[in-house]
Image (cartoon, helix red, strand yellow):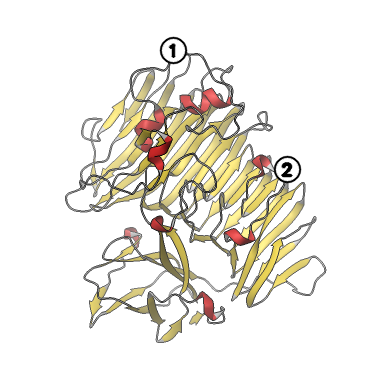
């Protein structure tokens, strides 16, 4: 049986499309995303927030029992010539009949519908029916029913439950330190548009959408996150976090990472959709938690669209004694930006026992190169504090500095950063598939007195490249830094390109660089 959500405020409705599912009206809400893969200036809250680089998308949720079929009929507000439903691994075929787009979904999960390319996409969230069993009148429950709400900062105590019912649009944020046994549940939207930002005295005093610091036993389930000004969900020095079936859409501001795990343990992210204007999932280490390690982190069965940054990432800041027991499994990366899977190791942590398994990465002929315009001075090159310690160690000439290689940095005088526009080459751009590299820039900023990290015991298994016609095998690289900072014992098992196994490093377009030992493709 299909059940649609129809009780959102009318102001939330998009004008891009109308739709039905099994002949029932489907409420299509709106959000905004980064239109082009480019950024301008220093990495701060407003570095590329311009109308030029902003476009509308649509999204909708409905419920379906497993085993049922949902036939979607989508009517665009324009004529269209082509349609693609992602992830491709789901095998959904759509057709255009009399100006309408028709397709059938047979499994719950998250889907993206693209008409004539990536712009103005529609994201569909198909959930199994779920009753959270929350007593909305209980003393420990913060309840938001259908309609629009403006709580600002939502304060939690131990054992609190925040419940966003279907049809709720909550303009607010949660930033909490030192709480235990808390939950954020429901089927509504948590929105943090700029006019509702809350700044607190937390790590960097950044305006995160949900931030738990020194907390234990956190559960987040079902919620749609929209329009965060910076990191969407982040945990720092926090233990035992379960995040399931969340959806992130409408992230167009700079640095809207999806999930940032900072010096934390026992973290899971499952069954979720993340479209972010920076890294989808990234595991970081920062002061003041540098002796709290990142350990036992598991990401599984997620669909990822990265408009800028890296889809599944270690780093770039890796200030901890060690990272270990980290798994990314059964994920679809439907759009990558700079890299699909990357270690950007800027710090000193020993990184080991990391596993990527059953990851499918889609490559389109329409992909264009990201561009990052930066000023010429060190201050413009990512130094947000003004107090960064600088290493006197000379920069290595080869290969290119990490950021220049990965992010296509364009250095220019500050005066040239005004009114820049996205002007890439017309040729197809291929984001890195696998990229393991020491990030000397972040190391110099965060821990110049420390040794560079070692990266070892990393296993990639059943990695599938799904490429459109005319797209070649994307590049990969594994490198160390020097004799004391190596990448070693890295295994890539069963790497395929459109179903064909790639036999060796040449066929796989794989660079095994200096100070990389025992890198094996099999």
Q: Is residue 386 left or right of residue 248?
A: right
Q: Residue furthest bottom?
A: 23
Q: Residue furthest left?
A: 470
Q: Quadrant of residue 303?
A: bottom left
Vertical comparison of 340 with 401: above or below: below
Q: How many other residues sit within 10 Å of disc 1, few (<14), some (14-19) or many (≥20)? A: few
Q: Are marks 1 and 2 in contact (CB under 8 Å)?
A: no
Residue pointed to by mark 2: 214
Nearer the observer, 304 or 277: 277
Q: Quadrant of residue 52?
A: bottom left
Residue 53 position, x and y percent, is: 40, 55
Nearer the observer, 9 or 383: 383
Q: Is residue 29 left or right of residue 113?
A: right
SS for callout 1: loop
Residue pointed to by mark 1: 483
Q: Is residue 143 left or right of residue 428?
A: right
Nearer the observer, 301 or 120: 120
Q: Label 1 vs label 2: CA separation?
A: 37 Å
Residue 88 position, x and y percent, is: 31, 59
SS for callout 2: loop
The tag on residue 50 is none
Nearer the observer, 34 or 127: 34
Give the mark, 1 or 2, whose residue is nearer the N terminus. 2
In what quadrant of the picture does the C terminus appear?
A: top left
């Amino acid at each position: 049986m299909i059940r649609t959500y129809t009780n959102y405020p009318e102001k939330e409705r998009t004008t891009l499309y109308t739709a039905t599912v099994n002949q029932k009206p489907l409420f299509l809400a709106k959000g905004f995303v980064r239109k082009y893969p480019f950024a301008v200036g220093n990495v701060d809250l407003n570095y590329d927030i311009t109308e030029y680089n902003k476009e509308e998308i649509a999204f909708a949720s409905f419920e379906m029992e497993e085993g049922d079929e949902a036939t979607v009929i989508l009517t665009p507000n324009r004529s269209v010539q082509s349609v693609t439903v992602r992830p491709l691994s789901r095998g959904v075929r759509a057709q255009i009949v009399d100006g309408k787009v028709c397709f059938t979904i047979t499994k719950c999960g998250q889907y993206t519908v693209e008409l004539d390319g990536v712009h103005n996409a529609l994201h569909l969230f198909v959930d199994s029916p779920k009753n959270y069993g929350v007593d909305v009148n209980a003393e420990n429950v913060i309840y938001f029913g259908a309609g629009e709400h403006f709580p600002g900062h939502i304060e939690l105590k131990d054992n609190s439950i925040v419940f966003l019912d279907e049809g709720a649009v909550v303009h607010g944020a949660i930033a909490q330190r030192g709480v235990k046994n808390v939950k954020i549940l429901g089927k509504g939207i948590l929105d943090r548009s700029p006019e509702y930002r809350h700044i607190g005295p937390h790590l960097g005093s950044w305006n995160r959408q949900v931030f738990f610091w020194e907390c234990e036993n956190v559960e987040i389930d079902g919620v749609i996150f929209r329009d965060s000004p910076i990191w969407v969900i982040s945990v720092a020095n926090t233990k035992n976090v379960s995040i399931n079936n969340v959806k992130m859409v409408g992230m167009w501001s700079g640095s809207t990472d999806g999930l940032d795990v900072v010096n934390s343990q026992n973290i899971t992210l499952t069954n979720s959709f993340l479209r972010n204007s920076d890294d989808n999932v990234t595991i970081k280490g920062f002061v003041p938690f540098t002796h709290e390690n990142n350990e036992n982190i598991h990401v599984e069965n997620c669909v990822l669209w990265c408009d800028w940054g890296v889809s599944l990432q270690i780093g770039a800041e890796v200030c901890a004694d060690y990272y270990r027991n980290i798994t990314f499994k059964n994920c679809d990366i439907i759009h990558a930006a700079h890299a699909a899977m990357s270690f950007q190791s800027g710090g000193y942590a020993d990184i080991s026992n990391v596993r990527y398994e059953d990851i499918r990465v889609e490559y389109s002929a329409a992909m264009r190169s990201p561009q990052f315009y930066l000023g010429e001075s060190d201050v413009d090159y990512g130094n947000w504090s003004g107090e960064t310690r600088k290493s006197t160690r000379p920069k290595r000439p080869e290969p290119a500095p990490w950021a220049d290689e990965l992010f296509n940095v364009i250095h220019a005088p500050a005066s040239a950063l005004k009114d820049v526009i996205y002007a890439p080459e017309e040729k197809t751009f291929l984001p890195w598939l696998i990229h393991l590299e020491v990030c000397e820039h972040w190391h110099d900023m965060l821990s110049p007195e420390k040794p560079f990290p070692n990266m070892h015991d990393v296993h990639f298994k059943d990695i599938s490249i799904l490429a459109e016609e005319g797209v070649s095998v994307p590049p990969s690289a594994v490198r160390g830094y020097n004799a004391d900072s190596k990448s070693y014992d890295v295994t890539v098992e069963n790497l395929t390109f459109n179903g064909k196994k790639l036999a060796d490093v040449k066929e796989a377009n794989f660079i095994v660089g200096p100070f990389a030992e025992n890198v094996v493709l099999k």
